[in-house]
Amino acid sequence: KAGVTQTPRYLIKTRGQQVTLSCSPISGHRSVSWYQQTPGQGLQFLFEYFSETQRNKGNFPGRFSGRQFSNSRSEMNVSTLELGDSALYLCASSLDGTGATGELFFGEGSRLTVL
Amino acid sequence: AQKITQTQPGMFVQEKEAVTLDCTYDTSDPSYGLFWYKQPSSGEMIFLIYQGSYDQQNATEGRYSLNFQKARKSANLVISASQLGDSAMYFCAMSQVSGGGADGLTFGKGTHLIIQP
């Protein structure tokens, strides 16, 4: 079956702009979670959506937001971009998001560069 | 709070040798899941293997096995007969199952594995 699809794969923005990233989960998966990966901080949890509801959020400022649609596709938005937002943004999908079954699969990521 | 420690920032291994990547974890929750992911230079996180805290047997997936020692809070990944294509970053991660929702995976800093011919 098709894997997790993230778009765009690469993008360049300037400080102060905003960006929207998209994630299409594996068919049948209802949970989508987002992670930020940087060389300094490593992989950090942003938030998780299940059935269009945000269930949990990591320790990120309010500039980072997301949403999930009825077809389980998810978008995340970063407003007022800062240089430190340059990162690989990874989306992961799973059946129920708890990690209980081990089914948690990642996309290839969206690499954001902020100039 | 959960914590994952990977003490090997980098490893060089000869092709066809077995590799053990170390991972220790810390959690106060009785129910949790442990994952290993491979991340090649392309960036994609590739799922390798999963171990639930209540699983009695060590997980295996092809050439990958997870050496789960619950009392020591360790979850080492063993790759048998390493191949050149195994060169990548490897991440150990933990999920909290008892929370009822997804609190997110806690990742270690990773081990950069390089397989030499």
Image (cartoon, rainbow, N blue to C red):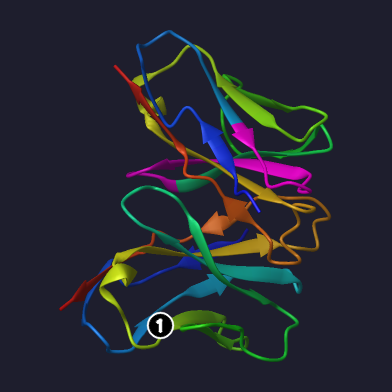
Q: Is residue B76 magenta?
A: no
Residue B50 quadrant: bottom right
Q: Is residue A36 magenta?
A: yes
Residue at the farthest top position:
A16
Given residues B52 and A62, the one toward you in this image is B52
Given residues B54 and A9, the one toward you in this image is A9
Check disc 1 and report its element: helix, strand or loop: strand
Left or right of residue A112: residue A93: right
Residue in view at x 69 percent, y 42 percent: A32
Residue A45, given in percent of the width and then of the height, sits at 58, 44
Residue A9, given in percent of the width and then of the height, sits at 43, 32
Residue in view at x 66 percent, y 61 percent: B95
Circle 1 sits on which residue?
B79
Residue in view at x 63 percent, y 58 percent: B1
Residue A51, given in percent of the width and then of the height, sits at 84, 37
Can you see residue B27?
A: no
- The image quadrant where one finds the C terminus of chain B is bottom left
Can you see residue A59?
A: yes
Left or right of residue A64: residue B109: left
Task: Give the residue type at disc 1.
Answer: Ile
Q: Name above or below for residue B114 compared with residue A34.
A: below
Q: Which residues are magenta?
A: A23-42
Given residues A76 and A58, the one toward you in this image is A76
Given residues A85 and B88, the one toward you in this image is B88
Residue at the farthest left position:
B117
- Mark 1, chain letter? B
Label 1 Cα neighbours within 10 Å, binned few <14 / some 14-19 / many ≥20: many
